Image (tube, rainbow, N blue to C red):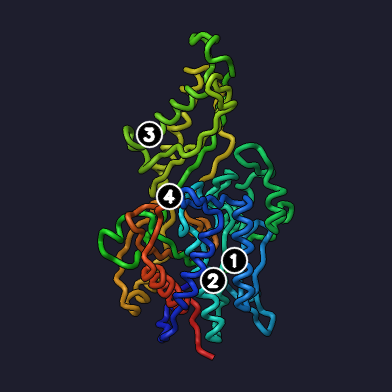
């Protein structure tokens, strides 16, 4: 990817806004809780499989090819008469299909559907391009059910050594069968990897998930860098016992240890200022009954910072705190899984293309960092990357209230289209 690829598209081409918004509504109905309005579509769960089926159906109905790779990623392409699909260097675009528990309709899904819309728009316009546009719906970015976040993008980027050989969910149930039901194959995971040089660029459109754009009254965010993240999945082993008959002295209470872990994570970010944010967002106690001392607890500690040195210092401090908590409570604390993504700067020529495309479309823009992790930072292993943000109403995400004004959703998709066209170096047929 070089600056010579960033040429003006000189086109009046626009995405079909009504079609994009319809698909967002339809996909947003999959996994929705009628009581809360939230969407629960964890990776490789039943609702995620339904979403994957919907996406493939929409792509095929549009005359595109769509299939699932060994990692469970949905790959969408234009059918090419010379059978050259996969033979040319690709410009990838997309995001993820899965959600957190009781999340919103746009995180991830918007970027996937916008990528589909751009791909369909290019196909309908009959564009000839030196590079092949490819849309992707990554699998299990959130890790809400199976604690291997960025699963799909890590497989695509060839980070196979960083993935567990026999991954399992938070309850110990193996991924193998769920992946097979999604169309993947754990034994053939290596076939999902794309080699360096096979991707000219990766572009991801996303809601901001924060308040910066809305507060500034700006329509487009040009992401400068993506935060790094270290997620530790912990297993605390104590001793279960009767809550009324077991003396306080000598207890090995896994829940007490878990509470201390929560406080330690808060201290690492707030008190010690070793990383920008630290969060315990998942906690599962066993046997989880009101009259029994917790014998075991599984929980996650999520550390984030844009500075890799600070991030590693925070992880080391957290591990030290775990050793002290284990000694204090008489419990055993082990890290059963670790997911790490390094902070990544986006590609300057691609940022310039996003800014130019925004101006061409009459949309205001500003540079900003991403405080959330994204598949883009993993794909950065094999290709230049860039991200486009649109405003989030109220700055909220991962909640049922997650929302963005329709005109911003359409505007962002048009910026993605024009940025892709610049990157593809297209010529009309």
Q: Is mark 4 on a helix, strand or loop?
A: loop
Of pointers 1 and 4, the one earlier in the residue sequence: 1
Q: Which of 368 and 364 is in front in this view?
A: 364
Residue that appears at 49% across and 65% down: 24
Give x and y (percent) for residue 319. 48, 31
Q: Quadrant of residue 156?
A: bottom right
> Image check: 273 left or right of 18?
left
Q: Are marks 3 and 1 in contact (CB under 8 Å)?
A: no
Residue that appears at 54% across and 10% down: 246
Residue at numbered disc 3: 266
Instruction: Judge whether residue 353 can be spotted in this image.
Output: yes
Mark 1–mark 4 Cα distance, whole angstroms, equals: 23 Å
Q: Residue 86 carries which label?
A: none
Instruction: Judge whether residue 190 can be spotted in this image.
Output: no
Give x and y (percent) for residue 130. 55, 81
Q: Nearer the viewer, residue 206 or 241?
A: 241
Question: Marks 2 and 4: which is nearer the front?
Answer: 4
Residue that appears at 32% across and 63% down: 367
Q: Do the residues labelled 2 and 3 touch (CB within 8 Å)?
A: no
Give x and y (percent) for residue 385. 47, 64
Mark 2–mark 4 Cα distance, whole angstroms, equals: 25 Å
Q: Residue 116 carries which label?
A: 2
Residue that appears at 56% across and 24% down: 289
Q: Do the residues labelled 1 and 2 touch (CB within 8 Å)?
A: yes
Of pointers 3 and 1, the one earlier in the residue sequence: 1
Q: Which mark is residue 399?
A: 4
Q: Which of 73 and 145 is in front in this view?
A: 145
Q: What element carries label 2?
A: helix
Of pointers 2 and 4, the one earlier in the residue sequence: 2
């Amino acid at each position: 990817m070089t600056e010579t690829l960033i040429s003006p598209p000189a086109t009046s081409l626009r995405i079909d806004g009504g079609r994009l918004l319809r698909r967002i509504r339809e996909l947003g109905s999959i996994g929705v809780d009628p009581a809360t309005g939230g969407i629960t579509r964890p990776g490789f769960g039943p609702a995620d499989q339904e979403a994957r089926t919907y996406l493939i159906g929409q792509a095929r109905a549009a005359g595109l090819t769509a299939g699932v790779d060994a990692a469970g990623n949905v790959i969408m392409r234009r059918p090419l008469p010379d059978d050259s699909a996969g033979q040319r260097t690709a410009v990838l675009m997309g995001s993820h299909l899965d959600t957190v528990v009781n999340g919103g309709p746009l995180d991830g899904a918007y970027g996937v559907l916008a990528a589909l819309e751009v791909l369909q728009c290019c196909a309908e316009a009959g564009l000839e391009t030196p590079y092949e546009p490819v849309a992707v719906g990554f699998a299990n970015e959130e890790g809400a059910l199976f604690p291997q976040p960025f699963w799909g993008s890590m497989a695509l980027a060839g980070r196979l050594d960083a993935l567990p050989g026999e991954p399992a969910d938070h309850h110990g149930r193996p991924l193998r069968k769920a992946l097979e039901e999604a169309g993947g194959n754990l034994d053939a995971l290596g076939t999902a990897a794309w080699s360096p040089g096979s991707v000219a660029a990766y572009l991801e459109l996303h809601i901001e998930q924060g308040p910066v754009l809305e507060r500034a009254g700006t329509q487009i965010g040009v992401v400068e860098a993506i935060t790094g993240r270290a997620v530790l999945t912990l297993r605390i082993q104590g001793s279960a016992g009767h809550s009324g008959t077991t003396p306080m002295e000598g207890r090995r209470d896994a829940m007490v240890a878990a509470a201390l872990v929560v406080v330690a994570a808060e201290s690492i970010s707030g008190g010690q200022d070793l990383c920008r944010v630290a969060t315990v967002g998942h906690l599962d106690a066993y046997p989880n009954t009101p009259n029994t001392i917790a014998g075991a607890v599984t929980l996650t500690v999520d550390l984030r910072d844009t500075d890799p040195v600070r991030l590693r210092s925070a992880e080391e401090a957290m591990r030290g705190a775990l050793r002290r908590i284990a000694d204090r409570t008489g419990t055993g604390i082990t890290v059963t899984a670790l997911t790490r993504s390094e902070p990544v700067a986006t590609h300057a020529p691609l940022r310039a293309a996003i800014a130019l495309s925004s101006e061409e479309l009459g949309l205001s823009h500003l540079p900003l960092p991403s405080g959330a992790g994204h598949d883009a930072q993993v794909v950065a292993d094999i290709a230049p990357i860039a991200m486009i943000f649109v405003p989030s109403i109220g700055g909220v995400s991962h909640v049922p209230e997650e929302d963005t004004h329709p005109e911003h959703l359409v505007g962002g998709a048009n910026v993605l289209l024009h940025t892709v066209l610049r990157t593809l170096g297209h010529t009309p047929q």
